[in-house]
Image (tube, helix red, strand yellow):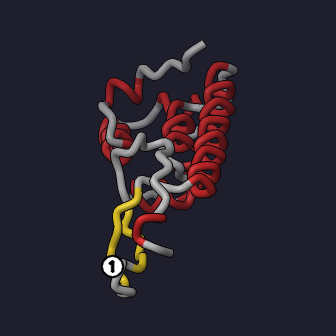
């Protein structure tokens, strides 16, 4: 691809982030060119974010119905599964699964709640008092 034809199609980042592309300059040499994005990649990113938002909404519905703890919302929002979260909080998977239940979540020790909040990069208060929108 020629240097002046490197796509500059802003996507979900609004042109804030850029990535390096390699293109051929007027002398026929490969050079680095910054690109704000290109349409096919933007389409894929948009679809991925829609999937993530859907997972968050499903988690929120379960929380509203009293079938899940706030941990499920933040797991979906941070794109984690039980295995990954258990690694981060350094707990067995079966314990993390148990903490996804409202009854077990309410019994968590302060240290465990702090650990989850730290992993999700939120405050303890945000985790404890989380209420799904609508």
Q: Residue at x 69, y 20 (%)?
A: 65
How many dots with numbers? 1
Q: Residue furthest front?
A: 26
User: How far from the left and from the top, in percent, is residue 38?
Assistant: 53, 56
The quarter of the displayed image where residue 104 is located: top right
Quarter of the image for the C terminus: give it. top right
Mark 1 surroundings within 10 Å by alpha-carbon count, few (fewer than 14), some (14 through 19), many (20 or more): few
Q: Residue furthest top?
A: 134
The vertical placement of 60 against 77, above or below, is above
The quarter of the displayed image where residue 76 is located: top right
In the picture, measured across the screen, residue 70 lies left or right of residue 88, that is right
Q: Residue at x 40, y 59 (%)?
A: 35
In the picture, measured across the screen, residue 45 lies left or right of residue 119, that is right
User: How far from the left and from the top, in percent, is residue 63?
Assistant: 62, 26
The quarter of the displayed image where residue 31 is located: bottom left
Q: Secondary structure at mark 1?
A: strand
Q: Residue at x 45, y 62 (%)?
A: 87
User: How far from the left and from the top, in percent, is residue 121?
Assistant: 32, 41
Q: Residue at x 63, y 53 (%)?
A: 44
* Residue that numbered label 1 is attached to: 31
Q: Front-most of 93 and 130?
A: 130
Q: Front-most of 24 and 48?
A: 24
User: How far from the left and from the top, in percent, is residue 124?
Assistant: 32, 31
The vertical placement of 6 against 47, above or below, is below
């Amino acid at each position: 691809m020629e240097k002046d034809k490197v796509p500059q199609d802003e996507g979900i980042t609004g042109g804030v982030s850029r990535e390096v592309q390699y293109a051929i300059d007027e002398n026929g040499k490969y050079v680095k060119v910054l690109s704000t994005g290109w349409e096919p990649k933007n389409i894929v990113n948009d679809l991925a974010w829609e999937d993530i938002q859907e997972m968050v909404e499903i988690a929120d519905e379960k929380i509203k119905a009293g079938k899940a703890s706030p941990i499920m919302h933040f797991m979906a929002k941070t794109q984690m599964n039980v295995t990954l979260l258990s690694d981060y909080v350094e707990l067995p998977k079966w314990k993390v699964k148990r903490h996804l239940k409202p009854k077990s979540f309410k019994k968590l020790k302060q240290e465990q709640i702090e650990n989850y909040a730290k992993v999700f990069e939120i405050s303890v208060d945000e985790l404890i008092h989380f209420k799904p929108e609508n």
